[in-house]
Image (cartoon, rainbow, N blue to C red):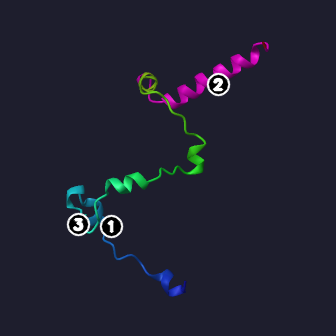
Amino acid sequence: MSGKDLSNTSRTNWAALEAMDDEGIDYSDIPPLTEEFFEKATLRIPASQAQQLVQIEPDVLKWFQAHGGEYKALINSILRHYIESQDEQPAV
């Protein structure tokens, strides 16, 4: 890449773009997604996020969310307490 390429600035009118609502966007040049597309599609989760991926049943998640805005911290606290209580118990 040349130095000239780095000096180019975007000619995008960002203010106008941010002010546009979804209905104002022209999608006519984008082909529709077909069933065949979804049959071949693969969900890819970045490795950093995949390490933290835990499936929580919807009713359990709702219960935690109903007990405060910091429900993720509450879940972690309860899991940590459980781990610590297991470490204190003698092995069977």
> From the image, which quarter does the N terminus lie in?
bottom right
Residue on which the image places disc 1: 14
Judge from the rendering whether residue 61 lies leftward or rightward of residue 22; answer left or right: right
Crowding at dot 2, Cα within 10 Å, few <14 / some 14-19 / many 20+, comes out as few
Crowding at dot 1, Cα within 10 Å, few <14 / some 14-19 / many 20+, comes out as few
Residue on which the image places disc 2: 80
- The kind of residue tagged 3 is Ser
Disc 2 versus disc 1: distance between alpha carbons? 46 Å
Report the mark closest to the observer, 2 or 1. Answer: 2
Quarter-wise, where is residue 41 in the image? Answer: bottom left
Above or below — where is 16 with respect to 73? below
Report the residue at 78% width, 12% height from top: 92
Residue 37 versus residue 23: which sits nearer the camera?
37
Query: Which of disc 3 and disc 1 is earlier in sequence?
Result: 1
| Residue 81 in the image, given as x and y percentages of width and height | 64, 20
Q: On residue 2, which mark appears?
A: none
Residue on which the image places disc 3: 28
Secondary-structure class at tag 1: helix
Disc 1 versus disc 3: distance between alpha carbons? 21 Å
| Residue 43 in the image, given as x and y percentages of width and height | 47, 50
Secondary-structure class at tag 2: helix
The magenta-colored residue range is 66-91
Residue 10 versus residue 45: which sits nearer the camera?
45
Judge from the rendering whether residue 89 lies leftward or rightward of residue 58; answer left or right: right
Report the residue at 46% width, 23% height from top: 60
Query: Which of disc 2 and disc 3 is earlier in sequence?
Result: 3
Judge from the rendering whether residue 69 lies leftward or rightward of residue 16; answer left or right: right
